[in-house]
Image (spheres, rainbow, N blue to C red):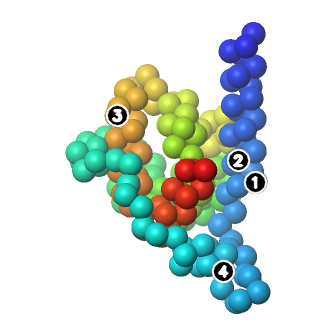
Amino acid sequence: MRSRNHLLLTNITMLLLAITGCSESPQTGRDGNTTHQAETERLPVYQRWYKREQTELGGLLFQQHCAVCHKADASGTPNWKETDAAGKLPPPPLNGTAHTWHHALPVLRRVVTLGGARLGGTMPAFGGKLSSDEIDAVLAWVQSHWPDKIYAIWNERNSQ
């Protein structure tokens, strides 16, 4: 029972994150700067959590398993916020220009492991194909494409 309740809570949390936390339109503050601009200008560049070897392995795995949908350069689908004819969300960019950086590492791991179908997308589950170390390698490669300012915001939000 506890496991089923935990899974339900996890699914609800991920759905709420997808619905409320993924807006890409920055807000303008009183100083005329966008919220993202103001945040990024005051944040230092952080040491990233992954190693170069992980990004190398992750790049190979990404090309093998993910590039067919998210494109070889992780640029994804241009209209990733619009549902397709079947009512599904297309693959978003993973290069720091979409919503991926809004989510903590454990959430990103769960999405790759369990897939994105239950969140309104079509991404299959990779938990049966990739080990947890391989999933981390893919996520390292993805995050290596994030600009330093985006990574700094992500790191600041997730270190609290």
Q: How many marks?
A: 4
- Tell me if mark 1 has few (under 14), some (14-19) or many (20+) residues whose alpha carbon lies within 10 angstroms of its own: few
Residue 67 image position (x, y, % from top left): 38, 49
* Residue at 39% from the left image edge and 39% from the top image edge: 136
Residue ranking furthest to the bottom = 32
Residue where numbered disc 2 is placed: 17
* Residue at 47% from the left image edge and 61% from the top image edge: 151
Label 2, secondary structure: give it: helix
Residue 139 image position (x, y, % from top left): 41, 45
- For marks 1 and 4, give the one nearer the viewer: 4
- Tell me if mark 4 has few (under 14), some (14-19) or many (20+) residues whose alpha carbon lies within 10 angstroms of its own: some
Q: CA distance from mark 4 to mark 3?
A: 36 Å
Label 3, secondary structure: give it: helix
Q: Does the residue at mark 2 contact the one at mark 1 (Cβ under 8 Å)?
A: yes
**N-terminal of the two: label 1 or label 4?**
1
Q: CA distance from mark 4 to mark 2?
A: 22 Å
**Residue situated in front as seen by the camera: 80 or 143:** 143
Q: Does the residue at mark 2 contact the one at mark 3 (Cβ under 8 Å)?
A: no
**Residue situated in front as seen by the camera: 121 or 99:** 99
**N-terminal of the two: label 2 or label 3?**
2
- What numbered label is drawn on residue 34? 4
* Residue at 60% from the left image edge and 63% from the top image edge: 79
Please, what is the three-letter code of the amino acid marked with disc 2?
A: Leu
Establish if 109 lies above or below 46. above
